[in-house]
Amino acid sequence: MLDMRGQLPQGPGAYLWRSFSTVKYIVLHHSGVDVDSSARQIALYHIGKYGWPGCGYHVVVRWDGTLEWANDWTTMSYHVARRNHECIGICCPGDYTSQLPRDAQLQAALHLARWLRQEFVPQAQIVGHRDISLPGYETACPGQLLAGSV
């Protein structure tokens, strides 16, 4: 895992912190764009488009399976509207509504999610973003082909 914390662009303000005891979900996301985006590129997008403090995910899993660690596990970053306090976010860049995720990327993301449960949040469920989105915040993320792999 490449530790990108402290090296990524920062926007205004700062993300809040929470304890592991509040985490109920490890959430898989896709970027919705068929590009192998880096944590740096995603951070720049989240800052520029939404004015967020930085990358909204905890880890970005590149197409080759490389893990880019963007935020501490206890950071309450923005990736599931109104549920960020109970989620750790893993993003798999790409659009998985019509194509399958890359095998190395999928295996790395699932391995990471299982490791997080084992080491830090045994109470957490591994879910797709759309599985826990609240009314008014519905989404197709992480696409049916990645969600079906969870």
Image: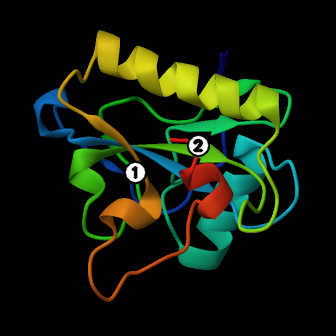
Numbered label attached to residue 77: 1
In the visual, does 31 lie left or right of 94? Answer: left
Q: Earlier in the sequence, mark 1 or mark 2?
A: 1
Q: Residue furthest front?
A: 148
User: Which quadrant of the view contains residue 60?
Assistant: top right
**Residue at (37, 62) in percent of width and height:** 131
At mark 2, the secondary structure is loop
| Front position in the image: 69 or 80 | 80
Numbered label attached to residue 141: none
For the N terminus, which image quadrant? Answer: top right
Q: Mark 1 near mark 2, Cβ–Cβ under 8 Å? A: no
Q: Which residue is mark 2?
A: 149
- x%, y% of residue 114? 43, 20
**Residue at (82, 39) in percent of width and height:** 102
**Residue type, numbered disc 1:** Ser
Q: Residue furthest top?
A: 119
